[in-house]
Amino acid sequence: MNNGSNSVEQKLPPSVVKALRRFMETKVWGKWAEATETHLQEPARQFDAEFMRKLVPKMETFGSYFGAEVRGMDRVPQSPVLLIGNHSGGIITPDTSAVYAAWYRARGFEDPLMGLAFDGIYGVPGWRDLMWKIGQMPASMDNAEAALGDGNSVLLYPGGSYEVFRPWKDRNRIVFKGRTGFIKLALKTRVPVVPVVGHGGHETTIVLTRGERLVKLLSLDKVRMDGAPLLFQIPWGISSPAMPGVPLPAKITVQVCEPLDWSRFGPEGADDPAVLEQCYEEITSTMQTTLDALAIENPRPLLGRFVRWKG
């Protein structure tokens, strides 16, 4: 543990600090980081249509546990398209599974939906193979641009892990942290941008804190993480994402919005801060307004699955 983490250590119980020190001595993060770097050298796109054909019915079964509903898929133009979504539910992200299942039921398996995934997942045996086969690529704008250039559509979550592990109090907020890389991508490639707004997913796993101050303490920056979240999960109680629990069956609703037309800015708009700010404000306000409406429509995604509310 470095000097920069001393203030965090001082606020933790001695027993916890001792356990963390023992854990760090295993050098697990270094091994994970090495495995990640090795597998990031593999081809970015390894989509397996036949595998996906078999997986979609299982995704739909999984979605039924959450009463998952995807609305407006018919609004998505012909590929290539850039789908921009909000990210919820911790590492399970059941809203993403619902979007994928809806996409292939509507578009078929010859029109793959590619996505960007957390780099560290490619250092985990089993998980990386699943990510490759369903069309997930390591999170880089170069990978996304190449996929769009080849005529594929791409699903991108600008908020990344920062948003997917936002605290419970922010469950109905769009949190992109000011990131504009996806806007530059859209302007350069001149593809339609379609906002995809999910609601309810953040009640399937209760996030207590992002744990940003624990990143250096645990050397998580080695595996490109910007937080060490604490979650409340069944059956573990307070736990970490490394111990996936049973997701709560909150109702998930995904609304596909009307495409945004940024073609008027041209590719040169990608280098204009004013254009980036305008586009950022447009898409985040559109998505927040949509999320607000979904929250009003169903204010209790979890409790509403069990109790019928009046009024």
Image: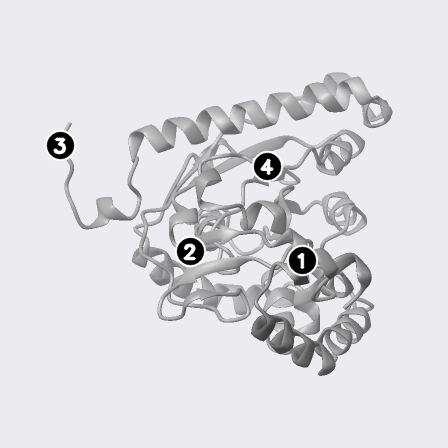
> Percent from the top left, x then y, of residue 166?
53, 46
Q: Foreground: 62 or 261?
A: 62
* Distance from Cα at disc 1 to Cα at disc 2: 25 Å
Compared to residue 84, the image places residue 92 above or below, namely below
Q: Amino acid at mark 4?
A: Gln
Residue at point 48%, 36% (across, down): 197
> Percent from the top left, x then y, of residue 117?
65, 56
* Distance from Cα at disc 4 to Cα at disc 2: 34 Å
Q: Amino acid at mark 1?
A: Val
Q: Is residue 151 left or right of residue 300?
A: right
* Distance from Cα at disc 4 to Cα at disc 3: 42 Å
Disc 1, disc 3: CB below 8 Å?
no
Assign the N terminus to one quadrant of the image: bottom right
Q: Earlier in the sequence, mark 1 or mark 3?
A: 1
Q: Earlier in the sequence, mark 4 or mark 3?
A: 4
Q: Which mark is residue 205?
A: 2
Disc 1, disc 2: CB below 8 Å?
no
**Residue for badge 4:** 78
User: Label 3: how many residues lie within 10 Å, few (<14), some (14-19) or many (20+)?
Assistant: few
Q: Foreground: 10 or 289?
A: 10
Q: Earlier in the sequence, mark 3 or mark 2?
A: 2
Residue at point 60%, 77% (across, down): 126
Q: Foreground: 85 or 35?
A: 35
**Residue for badge 1:** 8
Q: Tell me, yes or no, if residue 299 can be seen here.
A: yes
Badge 2 element? loop
Compared to residue 181, the image places residue 235 above or below, namely below
Q: Amino acid at mark 3?
A: Lys
Q: Is residue 142 left or right of residue 254?
A: right
Q: Earlier in the sequence, mark 1 or mark 4?
A: 1
Q: Quadrant of residue 217?
A: bottom right
* Distance from Cα at disc 1 to Cα at disc 3: 46 Å
